[in-house]
Image: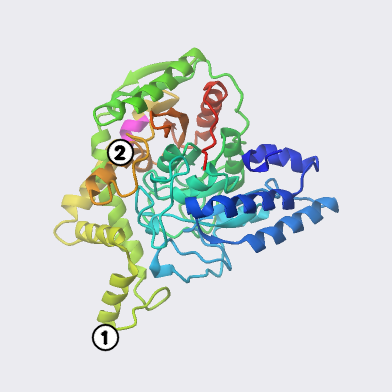
Amino acid sequence: MDLIKMTAHELKDKLETKEISSEEITRAYIDRIDKVEHKVNAYITLTTDKAINKAKEIDIKRANGEQVGALAGIPIAIKDNMCTRGIKTTCASKMLEYFVPPYSATVVEKLNKQDSVILGKLNMDEFAMGSSNENSYFHKTMNPWDLSRVPGGSSGGSAAAVAANEAVFTLGSDTGGSIRQPAHYCGVVGMKPTYGTVSRYGLVAFASSLDQIGPLTKDVKDMALVMNTITGHDKLDSSSYNNEYDDFGKYIGEDIKGKKIALPKEYFSKGVQSEVKEKVLAVARKLEDLGAVVEEVSMNMTDLALPAYYLISSAEASSNLARYDGVKYGFRAKDYDNLVDLYKQTRDEGFGKEVKRRIMLGTYALSSGYYDAYYKKAQQVRTLIKNEFDKVFESYDLILTPTGPSTAFKIGEKINNVVEMYMNDICTVPINIAGVPALSMNCGFDANNMPIGVQFISKAFNEKTILQVAYAYEQNRNLPDLTPQI
């Protein structure tokens, strides 16, 4: 029995029948981390002693017949921009290198309540800004399918850890595709839920109107399992939606006959790698074979999403990151002449290049004389994009697109070409702007054996339909062994 290749729902079944123990699973994952982590670099902080102690505690509870949580004994890991009480939360930045939060994010509390075992905190682009995981202050994470390639960003550590079997599932955050794009590059399942579905309390803010926490898992059934745990209203987050959520696994396995799926031609235009286009269109044909109705549509606002996204997200980032001034907490420069110089030196030394670039762009967009021309205009475009999505969902259950225009590129290949790097998010940012849910999952491989992701998008609070269709496809996709050879 190879424990590290099993999904969360498979492990859960074996734990409940006492075929295996939580400690056995946790030690298997720690052994795996010892074996491959020096090649993958998915983690910033490991908490192996805490994990073993937690696993033992759960085993004792089971042995005594005590009630345990839905994820009891499952080893997981958390992106390092979610606060964890007593464990460093660095945001992959020098600015927060030694920050240990006195509280945990609501999602972390929910996972703790369900008795999951936390293995550690995962690498990311600094303050979640990046598409390749090359902007971490600590180290670069490698793609487990090809260690010379990027895992995607900013949740690259979260995707790589699942792909390399260094965690059963992980949490990431998605501001413009930061869960789905690395899921696409690493061949795992990643979901950005509807904005407001998962509490953002305790998530270090990048762009507050776009940020959303979501899971990265080995399969669609695990996705439903984790979503059931982390969703729900939170009075500590004013943007949290007060709603009764259905069981996300309820519709998994149901027939998808008659589901209407839109195929927007703008997502398959120039710039999309031919193998990506071919594999995603093959998904559409497979869904038709399963009884879905697939039709081509046009979404004319797609080209405007990327500039609108970078203006809005950078403006919000410039505001959110103003708190890091060397006075209240975090890094402080050693040499300065006065208070203003303290601010300058701290922010110059504490932030990396990409973070400074976005702060400057955002500050300019919000400045007097330019607000109407840039920030206000971007918000008007945002409304038009949302209206366009709403219009499509009047006639269709889902929209089907590639998750990214190409497969994972070589480390360093795009680091000096900012526009080309930003273009990697062109298929994912419109979803955050519209605030709707989307899931990426593997649908094949290119000639270099790199994973290709397909993206399922639906209207707000309709994650259940995404999971239903994604599961139907997963059961019929006939792909080869999905484990990278490290």
Q: Amino acid at mark 2?
A: Ile
Q: Is residue 380 visible from the viewing direction of this image?
A: no
Q: Amino acid at mark 1?
A: Asn
- Residue 47 position by quadrant: bottom right
Return the x and y of residue 174 as percentages of the image width and height.
42, 47
x 24%, y 43%: residue: 420
Q: Which residue is mark 2?
A: 426
Q: Which residue is mark 1?
A: 338
- Viewer-closest of 232 and 18: 18
Q: Residue furthest bottom?
A: 337
- Viewer-closest of 391 and 421: 421
Local SS, label 1: loop
Task: Tell me: residue 46, above or below residue 313.
Answer: below
Task: Tell me: residue 54, above or below residue 245.
Answer: below
x 58%, y 40%: residue: 245
Return the x and y of residue 207 as percentages of the image width and height.
36, 54
Return the x and y of residue 395 as percentages of the image width and height.
39, 22
- Residue 396 position by quadrant: top left
Span shown in magenta = 386-390
